[in-house]
Image: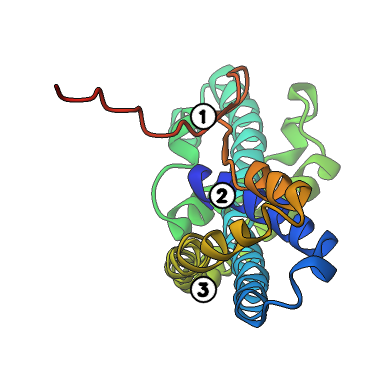
């Protein structure tokens, strides 16, 4: 969900709370009741789509985290093998594991898997010589588990990407519809209660102010109203 949408949703939640608290006040006005019911339904749909979108984002983050962890371990193993290869004068073996940290995890998923499996295979073949460089059978087992974890996590972002795109498109429509119901229906009917229920109108108008949350370390401020234009004379 984009930041402006999150800001709007917070305002929508505040509006829902106020409308629910003053339901006995506005219930006698059927037109407002219909608008409130429709608005509440849209807000629920927004939250459902937001969850779908978040799941997609989390799947991508999980994939990136697993890739990073695999790259770190693969670099440790390849470095240990390379150090032993240089010590023993085995130039061919040195070349097989000569990777920078970034090179191990760059490229497509199948390329990363092939690269890491090759490093694991070479390390397994030479395990008897690698103890002094910190490589043990337990370390290689951990490496193998990281490779498997990276392979298993691959389908998640791809399977959810289409759902995430659909959720993003749905959110755009839902926020547009929610704004329309508020501005053109609820906002137009609530002022009728200014005389009989002024606190309701006051709290509703306060809830309708969208607080613009900029991000960490930045002050929050309500969305400003349009500036008054000077009178022409």
Q: Secondary structure at mark 3?
A: helix
Mark 1 → mark 2, Cα distance in angstroms: 43 Å
In the rendering, which numbered label is found on residue 8? 2
Q: CA distance from mark 1 to mark 3?
A: 33 Å
Quadrant containing the C terminus in the rendered view: top left
* Marks 1 & 3, CB-CB < 8 Å contact: no
Residue 193 visible, this orientation: yes
Q: Nearer the viewer, mark 1 or mark 3?
A: 3
Seen in the picture, residue 39 relative to 95 is either above or below; the reply is: below
Q: Look at 54% across and 59% down and name the residue there.
A: 187
Instruction: Residue 163: give its label.
Output: 3
**Mark 1 highlights which residue?**
101
Q: Nearer the viewer, mark 1 or mark 2?
A: 2
Query: Looking at the image, which is closer to me, 81 or 40?
Result: 40
The mark lying in front, picked from 2 and 3, is 2
Q: Residue at x 49, y 56 (%)?
A: 114
The quadrant in which residue 226 appears is top left
Marks 1 & 2, CB-CB < 8 Å contact? no
Q: Earlier in the sequence, mark 1 or mark 3?
A: 1
Q: How is the image coloured?
A: rainbow
Q: Position of residue 199 (x, y in %)?
A: 77, 47
- Left or right of 103, for residue 80: right
- The image's mark for residue 210 is none
Residue 88 at what x, y percent from top left? 59, 22
Mark found first going from the N terminus, 1 or 2? 2
Q: CA distance from mark 2 to mark 3?
A: 23 Å
- Local crowd at mark 1 within 10 Å, few (<14), some, or many (≥20)? some
As displayed, is residue 103 above or below residue 179?
A: above
Disc 2 packing (10 Å; few <14; some 14–19; many ≥20): some
Name the one closer to the observer, 26 or 34. 26
Counting the numbered discs, the total is 3
């Amino acid at each position: 969900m984009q930041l402006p949408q999150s800001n709007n949703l917070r305002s929508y939640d505040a509006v829902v709370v106020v409308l629910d608290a003053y339901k006995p006040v506005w219930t006698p006005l059927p037109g407002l009741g219909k608008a409130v019911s429709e608005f509440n339904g849209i807000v629920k749909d927004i939250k459902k789509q937001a969850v779908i979108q978040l799941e997609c984002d989390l799947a991508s983050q999980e994939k990136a985290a697993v890739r990073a962890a695999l790259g770190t371990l693969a670099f440790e193993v390849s470095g240990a093998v390379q150090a032993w290869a240089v010590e023993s004068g085995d130039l061919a073996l040195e070349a097989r594991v000569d990777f920078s940290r970034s090179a191990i995890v760059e490229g497509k998923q199948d390329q990363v898997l092939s690269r890491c499996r090759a490093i694991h295979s070479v390390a397994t073949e030479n395990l008897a010589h690698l103890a002094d460089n910190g490589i043990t059978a337990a370390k290689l087992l951990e490496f193998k588990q990281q490779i498997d974890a990276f392979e298993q996590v691959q389908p998640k972002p791809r399977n959810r990407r289409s759902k995430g795109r659909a959720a993003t498109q749905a959110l755009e429509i839902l926020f547009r519809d929610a704004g329309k119901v508020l501005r053109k229906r609820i906002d137009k009917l609530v002022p009728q209660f200014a005389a009989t229920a002024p606190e309701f109108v006051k709290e509703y108008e306060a809830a309708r102010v969208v607080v613009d949350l900029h991000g960490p370390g930045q002050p929050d401020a309500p969305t400003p109203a349009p500036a008054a234009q000077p009178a022409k004379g």
